[in-house]
Image (cartoon, rainbow, N blue to C red):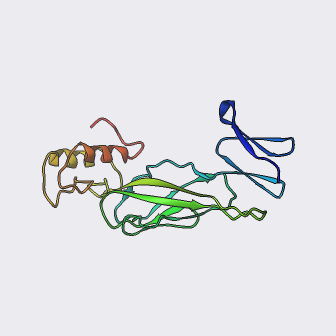
Amino acid sequence: MYPRRTNWGRGGAVTVFAAAMLWLAVPVGSAAAVTDGSVVVGHAISITSGTTLARATIDHPYLEEVLATGGNPPYKWSRAKGSKLPKGLKVAPSGAVTGTPKALGTFTFTIQVVDTKSSTKPITQNVATQVETLEVTKNPDLNGDGVVNCADLAVLTSQYGQSGPDLAADLDGDGTVTGHDLSILLSAWTPGQPTTC
């Protein structure tokens, strides 16, 4: 057996002395394994999509893809054990968060991605997890005409500051029409609709 030594170099590279006169620079974020005189370098898997998913609308179909890089594709996605998605949604093995949400609110859950086991020895498999946030709101088309525009803004402003269980403009479902509801409506404004009301 040859002596092994690890040195931390400039720029975050790791140099591994694994066999007689063999120096190997391994970039940070990669992994190296030495067995039977063979050196295997692999890249860790990482989730590249953001931690906040696109806003969902209650009782409307939803689809948002999460992405990863590194490791050994193809990847298999899932909800991490003990983590709950909003009722009506699931994480497909392809990385799609899909379904029809059935509850209002802001939800935090953990997704997990696993890559394909390597076919060379040593057999490795990478796993990455990430906490995601998803907000499920009411449909901001308050008057039901198929567009979000000044007419919907008029409904919201007429209810602004009010509290109660049945306010159409309470888009986030917290019981009060606030600036957050206004923000939801404005972010869903239909392109091409007048912005001066």
Q: Position of residue 102 (x, y in %)?
A: 33, 67
Q: Which residue is rendered at x = 76% and y = 46% of the image?
A: 4
Give above or below for 63 relative to 52: below
Q: Which residue is rendered at x = 21% and y = 55% of the image?
A: 174
Looking at the rendering, which quadrant does residue 82 occupy? bottom left
Count the marks. Answer: 0
Q: Position of residue 89 (x, y in %)?
A: 42, 67
Which quarter of the figure is the N terminus placed in?
Answer: bottom right
Q: Which residue is rendered at x = 43% and y = 52% of the image?
A: 54
Q: Nearer the viewer, residue 94 or 163?
A: 94
- Asked if residue 132 lies left or right of residue 136, the reply is right
- Asked if residue 149 lies left or right of residue 30, the reply is left
Q: Nearer the viewer, residue 171 or 38?
A: 38
Give above or below for 163 relative to 78: above
Which quarter of the figure is the C terminus placed in?
Answer: top left
Q: Position of residue 48 (x, y in %)?
A: 56, 48
Q: Quick one: which residue is furthest to the bottom in this view?
A: 88
Q: Which residue is rendered at x = 53% and y = 60% of the image?
A: 112
Q: Quick one: which residue is furthest to the top in this view?
A: 10
- Asked if residue 15 lies left or right of residue 19, the reply is left
Q: Position of residue 38 (x, y in %)?
A: 83, 54
Give above or below for 39 relative to 186: below
